[in-house]
Image (spheres, helix red, strand yellow):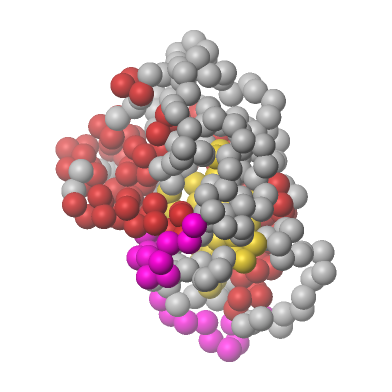
Amino acid sequence: MLKRLPILCFALLTLAACSHDSNSPAPAASAPSSSASAPVQAPAAATPGPAAAGTAAAASTAAPSSAPAATSTAASTAPATPADVPAFVEDPKWVEGKNYFRIEPAQPKVSNTDKVEVAEVFSYACPSCNNFHPMVDQLAKSLPSYAVMAYLPVSFIPQENFPMFQRAYLTAQALGVAEKANGAMYDAVWKSKELSSERADGQGLKPMSDLPKIEDAAKVYAKFGVDPKEFVAVANSFSINTQAKRADQLVKAYGVEGTPTIVIDGKYRIDGPSAGGYAQMVELAKYLAAKEAAGK
């Protein structure tokens, strides 16, 4: 895999992804704007194995299998009944190690659901996630009764404000508005630009000292009935600090190096390049969810 410094991630058709390199220095503020022509890639953290961050086959050192779950949308904990489980037939077009990757050993789920979990690993600041999220919304709505959607926010690109957006999502989830405000948060970054990490002239990134703060994110959530002062207080609480650490543990345990990535039940990892595009990610996620539900 081509090794590059973590710079502003760029949206590229269906195969772009935001990725990180934990050993690289912060990029200069003059990093190019979102009109670049190649996705940013980063080396794997340790062992093979969502999906390679922003790219195919790579994985990070697995965290202990006891790593606690991080976050999810409202997930039912009722186990699938035999009637819910589909008849499953292997499809030879999906090849383990090529189109998707097994996480070994299997890790905890993002949520505490007993159903099959389909988890999107994402950041609001990632342009590829912004492009992908309408398809994720449809995926969540179309999942069969034996499966449930969950979300795992990442923090691995501080230069693009990923840690703030991770904290904002976890706080919104704790206050019960994460799902309702999901589209608004993407719009605040990529349409109105009120939460953008880019300079106003579009010529690279803002200095980290000028990146939007959690107080700015609170203003977006205020449109959904949340008191901004309460939001900031919860965002800075011990509980959210703990959840952020757990989210980071799961990202590492899953071998995630880029966004968007999909993880099935803490067992399988999917990324856009290996799956063949965003539509294929969705198709493959449903296939692996059915495979997991059938105990295959």
Q: Residue at x 72, y 58 (%)?
A: 99
x and y percent of residue 259 in the render?
55, 45
Residue 192 appears in the picture as rendered: no
x and y percent of residue 74 in the render?
39, 63
On the rendered image, what quadrant is the C terminus found in?
A: bottom right
x and y percent of residue 277 in the render?
72, 47
Q: Residue furthest right?
A: 92
Front position in the image: 244 or 118: 244
Q: Give the range drawn in magenta.
A: 61-86
Front position in the image: 24 or 139: 24
Is 280 displayed left or right of 256 in the figure?
right
Q: Residue furthest top?
A: 201
* Vertical placement of residue 244 versus 97, above or below: above
Asked if residue 290 is among those painted magenta in the image, a careful observer would answer no
Front position in the image: 238 or 225: 238
Q: Which residue is drawn at 55% across and 45% down?
A: 258
Q: In which quarter of the image is residue 263?
A: bottom right
Q: In which quarter of the image is residue 231?
A: top left
Is 44 displayed left or right of 223 in the figure?
right
Main SS of the magenta segment?
A: loop
Is 40 displayed left or right of 149 in the figure?
right
Residue 78 appears in the picture as rendered: yes
Q: Residue at x 25, y 50 (%)?
A: 241
Q: Which residue lies furthest to the bottom in this view?
A: 82
Front position in the image: 267 or 223: 267
Q: Residue at x 34, y 37 (%)?
A: 164
